[in-house]
Image (cartoon, rainbow, N blue to C red):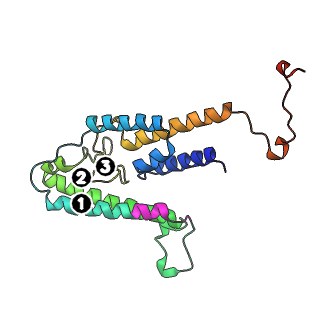
Amino acid sequence: MDLPHIRKAKINYLLTQLNDGKRVTDQAIQSVLTEQEWQELAKEIDQWKIKCQPRAKPYGRMPSELERYADLIKAADCLFSRAKACRDKTYPRSVGFMLPPMHLRGLTAKELRYCEAENAYDDALEKLAEMLSDEPGLAIWLDRPARFGQNDGTVSANPDGVPRLITSRSVHARHYSPGKPTKSSLQKWALQSSLNRFDLFLSLEPPPIPQRYAAKVRRTPDLDDGW
């Protein structure tokens, strides 16, 4: 594989990482962009840091009840990550004592792990609802409004749908106003733009002459050669 196509493969790999919600370092992004493309992205990131400042933290120490909630969310995140990494195989029916409940039989191991993660998120949300019912003021420590109604609810049992503490460093934390770009979205924009320009360049470039025919190609005579 030649160097241009290696660069294209690296860009596609980094885009896949970002689309999967994984963090990509600035060094990795810079290694596949041109100097001008990187300068444009660095400028956008600097402006993003200024405009999208995190919410100010409340004064005082975070209540211990919320620390318990944060632990439940962390445990659910671990289960969700294990589900994503799990191979999609049918549950082993031969091991009788390991069989899941009847309504879950027939699911793959991956699907079962997702069910475990969803149940863990549900337990965390139930705990949060109890805490906010007893002490509504705890909501100032959350990164988003937490409404639990069936029609107008703002929470759901998944990594992006559960409220997180404003001190959380999770990639799923919502520290910024809806509609504003995130650093990963700026990185994806820069990589996709570079990939589009790269594909356009390849489409305009004439196809190379196969090596075995290169020696047989004669130079086309022109008028200045005395023909």
Expressed as whole percent of the image width and height from the top left, the position of residue 162 reads 31, 52
- Looking at the image, the residue that sits furthest to the left is 60
Expressed as whole percent of the image width and height from the top left, the position of residue 150 reads 32, 46
Quick one: label 2 or label 3, which is nearer the N terminus? Answer: 2
The residue where tag 1 is placed is: 69
Residue 79 quadrant: bottom left
Q: Amino acid at mark 3?
A: Ala
The residue where tag 2 is placed is: 165
Q: In the image, is residue 121 above or below residue 14?
A: below
Q: Which residues are magenta?
A: 79-88
Q: Amino acid at mark 1?
A: Tyr
Quadrant (top left, top right, bottom left, bottom right) of the C terminus: top right
Q: CA distance from mark 1 to mark 2?
A: 9 Å
- 152 or 39, nearer to the observer: 39
Q: Amino acid at mark 2?
A: Leu
The residue where tag 3 is placed is: 173
Say if mark 2 contacts mark 3, CB within 8 Å. yes
Quick check: is 133 in the magenta stretch?
A: no
Quick one: label 3 or label 1, which is nearer the N terminus? Answer: 1
Say if mark 1 contacts mark 2, CB within 8 Å. yes
Residue 103's label in the rendered image is: none
Majority SS type along the magenta span: helix
Q: Is residue 167 in view from this perspective?
A: yes
Quick one: label 1 or label 2, which is nearer the N terminus? Answer: 1
